[in-house]
Image (cartoon, rainbow, N blue to C red):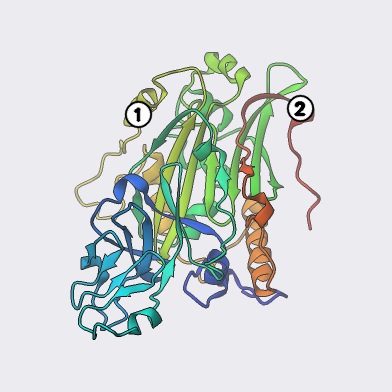
Amino acid sequence: MARDGGVSLTDLVRVGKGTPGGEWLRRYWLVVSRAEDLHDVPQAVRILGEDLVLFRDGAGRPGLLGIACPHRGTSLEYGDVEDGGLRCPYHGWLFDVTGQCLEQPAEPKDSTFYQRVRHLAYPVRELGGLLFAYLGPGADQPPPLPRYAPLVEPGQRQLEPVRHLDYNWFNFWENSADPCHISVLHRFSAYGAQTWGNQFFDYHDMPAFEPVEQDYGLTIVMQKPAPTPDMVFVDEMSLALPSIIQIGDTEFVHLRQEQAATLAGGSHNAHLLFLTPKDDDHFMLFTVDHYTGPEPGFFAKLKAMRAHEVPRQAVKPYDRRKYMPFRGSVRDEDIVTQATQGLLGERSERLASSDRGVIVLRRIVREAVEAVQRGARPRGVLAPDEAERVVRLDTFVGVRPQAAVPQAAPAR
């Protein structure tokens, strides 16, 4: 499964320290928690195969340390939060958010040994209600944390509870580079009968699409003819490195066909997903909705729409399949198809022309992994002088002039 550069498909999806994919992922800021979920009790977290403890010190500063105390290995998950940091319950060694040991109560009063103990620590920053951590090299001067538009710009913002899924993260991520599955897998759920979504994602008349490369990753641009010859219906989904998805059609998929005129103003809700691998077989999913439209109660309306998205299959008493029922819920439909795929590079595949988005995405990730191996800055990692830049992902949904639709670059 290797190519000329030596990076295999399996290399793209494994996340452990020292693996090609793991070293690549460590060049980015990853979400490790919602800010509202971190209180005055330390939390054990597993990120990229590393067992860590997340906490806030007495001053409210977030910290992320190795979970095992460097003294004798006791779990710091059971430590005590103090003004200075996190104190091990076994012998009272105190560590600040940088991992520096501040106190060792059992050592002689004139001992300076504590000054020479620096525990594993990773920087943590808060943005838009999320806590991001950087697990890569140069932690004293990490790259800028991207200021994603839905996290920093005005509007209504909603963060869903964290979801924990038990399969490889890449299966979920690359699914968004495969728009054809929407017309097939989701035709009886959110994009279902008698909605604009069902007309756009018609099983018998799927939208044309092209993968368009971006400086942050990839945009899947789907389109269908609009009522006038010079216009088209457009639906864009974007994938940003290393593991981010943004969808723009959340507010439209339930529209009736006669309401399609509503699309003329374009989409107002960015549905942003951050995937954080725990290890090769588990990941966390952090979901943010950012609405900039005129409806003051948009999220209540969205909640009501989603309440209809529940599995509606009748399950026979002898049906012992693990994921039944699943049809009728977009999220359950995605889980059953992605969790049963197996690991990329180890499963057998026969890719077709409709998989061109997936093919382009895998190439982009390979190039990013290879950039890290060369010591270069991979795509999506900001340069120091870009710290104030607002990162915008392309997820326009609506009616657009044909000439304004982004086009794919020639195939490489």
The reply to whether discs 1 and 2 touch (Cβ–Cβ < 8 Å) is no
Depicted 379 relative to depicted 375: above or below: above
Mark found first going from the N terminus, 1 or 2: 1
Spot occupied by residue 198 in the image (x, y as percentages of width and height) = 51, 28
Q: Which residue is identified by label 1?
A: 303
Question: Is residue 189 visible in the rendered structure shown here?
Answer: no
Depicted 222 relative to depicted 6: above or below: above
Query: Under tag 2, what secondary structure?
Result: helix
Spot occupied by residue 280 in the image (x, y as percentages of width and height) = 43, 68
Q: Name the side, left or right, on which 203 lies relative to 389.
A: left
State the image quarter where residue 21 is shown: bottom right
Q: Amino acid at mark 2?
A: Gln
User: 251 or 216: nearer the eye?
Assistant: 216
State the image quarter where residue 391 is shown: top right
* Residue 402 tag number: 2
Q: Name the side, left or right, on which 263 lies relative to 298.
A: right
Spot occupied by residue 348 in the image (x, y as percentages of width and height) = 54, 67
Q: Residue at x 67, y 70 (%)?
A: 370
* Residue 29 tag number: none
Q: CA distance from mark 1 to mark 2?
A: 33 Å
> Within 10 Å of the Cα at label 2, are there few (<14), some (14-19), or many (20+) other Cα atoms?
some
Spot occupied by residue 394 in the image (x, y as percentages of width and height) = 63, 38
State the image quarter where residue 80 is shown: bottom left
User: 293 or 69: nearer the eye?
Assistant: 69
Depicted 290 relative to depicted 78: above or below: above
Q: Name the side, left or right, on which 192 lies relative to 89.
A: right
Number of marks drawn: 2
Question: Is residue 355 visible in the rendered structure shown here?
Answer: yes
Question: Which quadrant, please, contains the N terminus?
Answer: bottom right
Q: Residue at x 67, y 77 (%)?
A: 6
Q: Amino acid at mark 1?
A: Lys
